[in-house]
Amino acid sequence: MSAIETLSPALLERLPAAVQTPAYHRAALAAGMAHLGVGAFHRCHQAEYTDDLLSLHFDRWGVIGINIRPPSLTETLGRQSGLYTRLIRENSHIEARVIGSILEVVDSQASVAPALDVLSSPDIELVTMTVTEKGYCQIPSSGELDLGHPDIVHDLANPERPRSVPGILAKALELRRATHGRPLTLLSCDNIPTNGVILANVVQAFAERRENGLAEWIEANATFPSAMVDRIAPAVTQDDLDSVEQWFGYRDAAVAVGEPFRQWVIERKFAGRMPRWDLVGATFVDDVTPFEHLKMRVLNG
């Protein structure tokens, strides 16, 4: 490479050997899941596990990333066709790996329509999310839906134009019921104990207030597994962006940095097909609680 190029599908085959690239034919990859909240943690965790799985066992599990809150990703990750470099720094050693599991990013901040189009698509069998604790619009002491939350007040009055996570997911499920009826697994990957229970509570409570049978349909056709996630993903600095260019000779505006250790424990509670993340280091269990307790004890220790 002579001139400095920006990461792109066309550049993949010309990257230096020191940069690990997707070990599958990315152009053949079709979308099967969506992710809400495409931040650094998702890119260092769920997207990397998915990339591992696609390399081991290629299947229809490409990710469509959706952001309903800033930052906008169309100018960074979007321009790179979803490709980005995951860096791991250990002492003086830098490991660079291009992750290819995110096929497309949808910014749905100005209008909810693009997000709803993706989430209601019959091709999407799974929705994962990292929306932070605030995104669930819950009452922290009880885990119940906060009916006084301004976004929930707005969404109950304007169910066709939701702006909260519970409102958007409820509307997407309503569209799925109306158009094709395919089941959906909704998997929280936020670092909150019993995150699946909380997600189910807020979506179901919102749906019940629609009074159109939606809550009953969700009960029969959607599942909300709990999960325990662990990986430290430090904030990306200008030095990180510069180091990709200096060490490996290309530009990447969507670098993610992770520490080596990662863990993902997922409750076996699926509405349909699921990616076999258990083949690449994740753990499928009947009850996540003991793992959450262990993590808390280690952190507190």
Image (cartoon, grey):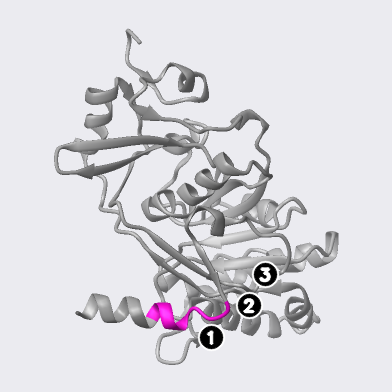
Horizontal relation, residue 210 to residue 137: left or right: right
Q: Which mark is residue 204?
A: none
Q: Locate the C terminus and report the quarter of the image it occupies.
A: bottom left
Check the image and report above or below for 161 versus 154: above
Q: Reply yes or no: does residue 211 show up in magenta.
A: no
Q: Earlier in the sequence, mark 2 or mark 3?
A: 2
SS at mark 3 in the image: loop
Residue 159 visible: no
Q: Nearer the viewer, mark 3 or mark 1?
A: 3
Question: Looking at the image, which residue is at 51% across and 73% down?
Answer: 151
Callout 2–callout 1 Cβ contact below 8 Å: yes
**Residue at 35% over, 10% down:** 1
- The circle drawn on residue 147 is 1
Query: Label 3, label 1: how many angstroms apart (C-alpha)?
Result: 28 Å
Percent across and percent down for residue 19 are 36, 28
Name the kind of residue labelled 3 in the image: Phe
Q: Which residue is mark 3?
A: 270
Is 249 rendered above or below residue 156?
A: above
Question: Residue 250, how many percent across, how many down?
Answer: 33, 22
Find disc 2 in the rendering and name its residue: 156
Three-letter residue code for mark 1? Leu
Q: Which residue, as the protein is rendered here, is positioned at the far left?
A: 92
Question: Which type of secondary structure does the marked residue at label 2 adopt?
Answer: helix
Point out the stretch of residues depicted in magenta: 286-292
Is 27 positioned to the left or the right of 229 in the image?
Answer: right
Does the image show residue 20? yes
Q: Where's residue 192, x and y in %? A: 41, 76
Mark 2 and mark 1: span between their CA atoms?
Answer: 9 Å
Disc 2 versus disc 3: nearer the observer: 3
Q: Amino acid at mark 2?
A: Leu
Q: Nearer the viewer, residue 212 or 111?
A: 212
